[in-house]
Amino acid sequence: MNGFNHLLLILAAFAALAFVLLVFLLARRTRGEGLEPPDPQPAPAPRPARPRAPPIADPIETERPPYTAWRLISRAVANPDSAGGPLYRLRLEPEDGLPEWRAGAVAHVYCGPAQDVLDPGGRPAQLAAGDYMIGSLPAEGAIHLVVRKVPTSAPAEGRRSRWLCEEVDTGQRIALLVRDDPAFVPPPDTVPLILIGNATGLAGLHAHIKARPAGTRNWLIFGDRNSADDEVLAAEIAEWVSTGHLERCDLVFPGETGEQRLVTDQIKDAKAPILDWVLAGGAIYVCGSKRMDDDVHATLGDLLGTGVLEAMTEAGLYRRSVY
């Protein structure tokens, strides 16, 4: 082999060696070894800590109304044979100053030991408070309530009513607050007023009648199955009728006559004068049970037309307070 061939072999050997060395170095770099360290990877940005939700407050503590202290002055059975349970009349007077309220106002009564809500550390019981229509005005110096003793078949309402009608003693402290009901405020004195209701709705109707000044036009349509034993009701209504404060009074008590007659029957019979009062710009206020209100609303809709009722509602001339 000549010298030229030897030179080619040596060059080929060096080229092969260089190729092997290059492959080796590239392999090490791929694995992150040798030469220079791999480019540092940026550390992931720390995730912001999720704000911890505040502890859930006791709903009773959060929503505790600003009760004030009152005393039960008197309680009497007004109508022991009333349908669904006897009706009781309660009189309560404040320990401190008498608040102001309008006809249609509501007493939110805590039906349990007053210290539960009057003392800062007290623990109110669930379902222990109820709303009751106030049947008096501030000028009388007291709150008058009409409460039905509800049977045990209605657990929550029954527990509250039994406490008010039987368990609380005369002179005992009671926690309550007085609030106006914007949906049941009195109409202007110049507006003729038809008041329709039943049972404990009597309290709300009474307050509105008392609030009307002499010379106003007022008409009461009231019903319950039994009423003869409610002497206070009879005396008040008789006085209002005799003085003309009630221009008209229609009472419906089917339990005394055996006739199956309802408040809605009286409304149907009085269709013509009701239309006259409405056409004269009169208002209609309804206060009582939800069932009665549904029936009265449907009857008035048939009598006056749903469009008229809607227009009266928008004008504040048709108001309802039901339970």
Image: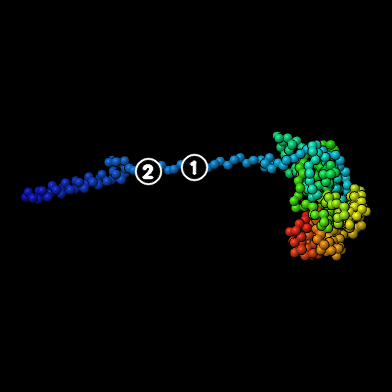
- Its colouring scheme is rainbow
- The quadrant holding residue 269 is bottom right
In the picture as drawn, the residue positioned furthest to the left comes out as: 2
Visible in this render: residue 115?
yes
Q: Position of residue 189 (x, y in %)?
A: 82, 54
Which residue type carries mark 2? Gln
Q: Secondary structure at mark 2?
A: loop
Identify the residue position indicated by label 1 in the image. Answer: 48
Camera-nearest label, 2 or 1: 1
Q: Position of residue 35 (x, y in %)?
A: 27, 41
Depicted 233 relative to depicted 277: above or below = above
Q: Secondary structure at mark 1?
A: loop
User: How dense is the environment of label 1, judged by Cα within 10 Å: few (below 14), some, or many (20 and up)?
Assistant: few
Depicted 73 relative to depicted 274: above or below = above
Which residue type carries mark 1? Pro
Identify the residue position indicated by label 2 in the image. Answer: 41
User: How dense is the environment of label 2, judged by Cα within 10 Å: few (below 14), some, or many (20 and up)?
Assistant: few
